[in-house]
Image: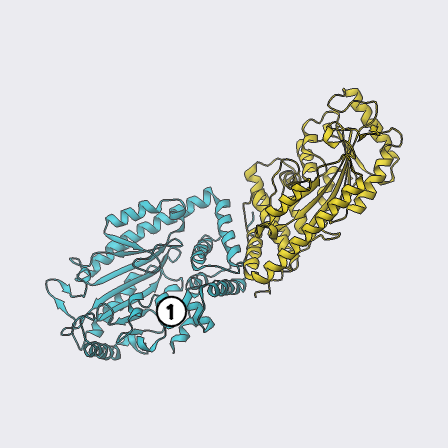
Chain colours: A yellow, B cyan
């Protein structure tokens, strides 16, 4: 399997399966790890960074989870390839910026990805579709063991895992749940929800992680604290909070549906109409309209569209994906035209049942 | 034929046939006439107004053009019926307001309508689809003769035809051409065009006559002066002006199509997408979107839609038409829902060819 082949498959986290997948897009756990005796990447020299890569490779070869995984040196990838991996949430934007002696390992189903020589020697990520932290935790826990089998990770009895940035020290674990909360946004209840989350020391980000704004009604909720708590405690606390948000969005959806059905149908069908007819469309507008389409599918207003297809369109319409599909560089204007073309193509092959006029 | 039956047919002026019908919606001539020896309607008593009605009826019975025409006392029509006739451009809003001893006569194809006891004893109107003033003039000239055969019209050798309002005196003729000028509007050339028209003593109005704003890119151009010129002179002068405007819109369309095809396709297809998917839509938005749809049909961007269907939708989606179709009173919110439903219904039976993605 080559990198280019990934575009022909739906990433695990976009399949739209798993628990509560009408509201929870994905569950992600990330562990930061560093080998003992080698400086953190920002302080390490090339030789030391290469040593990290070798040690990771040794771990990979012994891990059942990583059998047949893909491994790339970032210096071997062009800019579109790197951006493509960022858009698929397989690596960070920062990792792509200075490719020298950095690498990435990923499983072909895109559940596991490991960034090597990012801020820490290893950033291990497991991402699952829907609300499925238990499974993600089992996988990443095993991976953690596999990768430290030959060469131990830097660990202090007092602090826990040692990391380049002290805010990660301790469990060095970040758990992130991507939620789709269109009706809490529409009914302006979202600010209250986000305030409550912040008070509980969780952070909220947009579709593309740190520093990005929430757009198209997508919110990524993560733990902020990784020190002084056990992994299972962090997971349980986050699960409780997410469960509450899911319930609030569900309640808001039912209330809106019973009180403002026509308004909701209008908004959803107009979004569909624009998506399937536009000839020029920006990335931002696409995310907003797809958000409405997904809500329409969740509520049974739009029938005949599979959830994975809508999820997939969120990613396929991103800049590097469009260029990967076209196999050439496109400027923003060209992308807006190609994006519209792709959406029309993907949506028009589906037979939509419009017989719900009242 | 009853009044209700009109809703099942496309008015002559909406057929989308006739010369230059891609830009000229309709050609209309109106003559104001008053019988000698009877005061103008605002000064006449009931008995005198009834006498007017009798004299018109006598004229109607002898006119070949008015054979099998429909005749209604406005007091016999309910509010929706009256508004319905206004929306079809068969009578004025003013005529509907005080129905007492007022009447209307119209031919079943809606080419001819005669308001009786409006501001003048008679307001004779002939309306044709497309740019067809010659035919309209022939018809109305004959009607003028027919109706004054038994009872002569008030006429002064010095002034011409006498009318209630002195601005109409002379030919007492108003010629109006309804134009669809979306690209002159889009490219902001319209103000220059309207300025030039005003300097030539022509007036510009919207879809619904005096006092209404131009909306959805429709402009009704009329002569202002009816005194001191022969009918043929007025007609020739207006024809020359309209011909120039048609050419300017045509040139602007071709330029836009060659320079900004994607933008134009985007605008037109998005309008189609909204029309065929909206569940709540106002009258104003409908006119704007239908205007784009009509442009798309004119330019061959949207194939498979007949022009008459689009024209018809402009009228069917008006408030009284919606209520006439539903056979009951509807409040504005209910109308916005029914309007959207009607548009979806009418447009979705057409097989649209979308294979022009190049």
The quadrant in which residue B325 appears is: bottom left
Up the image or down, B143 lies above or below A319; here it is below
Frontmost residue, B339 versus B358: B339
Up the image or down, A241 lies above or below A155; here it is below
Q: Secondary structure at mark 1?
A: helix
The quadrant in which residue B219 appears is: bottom left
Q: Position of residue B107 (x, y in %)?
A: 33, 73
State the quadrant of the N terminus of chain B: bottom left
Q: Residue furthest left?
A: B158
The quadrant in which residue A163 appears is: top right
Q: Is residue B281 left or right of residue A181?
A: left
Disc 1 target residue? B84
Up the image or down, B249 lies above or below B125; here it is above
Q: Is residue A172 left or right of residue B191?
A: right
Chain letter of the residue carrying label 1: B
Label 1: few (<14), some (14–19) or many (≥20) C-alpha neighbours in 10 Å: many
Up the image or down, A96 lies above or below A23; here it is above
Q: Is residue B292 left or right of residue B166?
A: right
Frontmost residue, A52 versus B243: A52
Residue at horizontal 24 percent and vertical 58 percent from the top: B235
Frontmost residue, B88 versus A91: A91
Q: Is residue A70 left or right of residue A358?
A: right
Q: Position of residue B33 (x, y in %)?
A: 20, 69
Q: Position of residue B332 (x, y in %)?
A: 44, 64
Q: Position of residue B124 (x, y in %)?
A: 26, 69
- Whether residue A15 is visible: yes
- Whether residue A340 is visible: no
């Amino acid at each position: 399997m080559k990198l280019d082949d990934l575009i022909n498959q739906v990433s695990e986290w976009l399949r739209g399966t798993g628990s509560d997948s009408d509201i929870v897009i994905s569950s992600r756990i990330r562990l930061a790890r560093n080998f003992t005796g080698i400086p953190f990447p920002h302080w390490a020299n090339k030789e030391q960074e290469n040593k990290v890569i070798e040690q990771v490779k040794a771990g990979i070869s012994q891990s059942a989870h990583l059998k047949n995984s893909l491994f790339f040196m970032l210096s071997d990838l062009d800019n579109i390839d790197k951006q493509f991996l960022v858009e698929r949430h397989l690596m960070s934007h920062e990792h792509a910026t200075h490719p020298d002696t950095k690498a990435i390992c990923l499983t072909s189903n895109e559940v596991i990805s490991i960034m090597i020589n990012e801020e820490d020697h290893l950033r291990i990520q497991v991402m699952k579709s829907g609300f499925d932290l238990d499974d993600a935790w089992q996988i990443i826990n095993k991976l953690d063991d596999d990768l430290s089998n030959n060469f131990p990770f830097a660990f202090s009895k007092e602090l826990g895992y040692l990391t380049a940035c002290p805010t990660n020290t301790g469990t060095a674990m970040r758990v992130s749940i991507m939620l789709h909360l269109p009706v809490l946004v529409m009914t302006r209840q979202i600010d209250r929800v986000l305030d409550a989350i912040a008070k509980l020391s969780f952070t909220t980000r947009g579709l593309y992680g740190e520093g990005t704004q929430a757009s198209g009604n997508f919110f990524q909720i993560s733990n902020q604290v990784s020190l002084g708590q056990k992994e299972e405690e962090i997971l349980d606390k986050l699960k409780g909070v997410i469960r509450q948000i899911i319930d609030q969005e569900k309640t808001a959806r039912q209330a809106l549906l019973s009180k403002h059905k026509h308004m909701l149908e209008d908004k959803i069908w107009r979004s569909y109409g624009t998506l399937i007819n536009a000839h020029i469309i920006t990335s931002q507008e696409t995310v907003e309209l797809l958000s409405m389409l997904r809500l329409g599918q969740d509520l049974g207003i739009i029938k005949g569209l599979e959830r994975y297809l809508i999820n997939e369109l969120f990613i396929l319409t991103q800049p590097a994906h469009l260029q990967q599909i076209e196999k050439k560089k496109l400027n923003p204007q060209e992308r807006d035209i190609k994006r519209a073309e792709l959406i029309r193509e993907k949506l028009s092959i589906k037979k939509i049942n419009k017989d719900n006029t009242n």
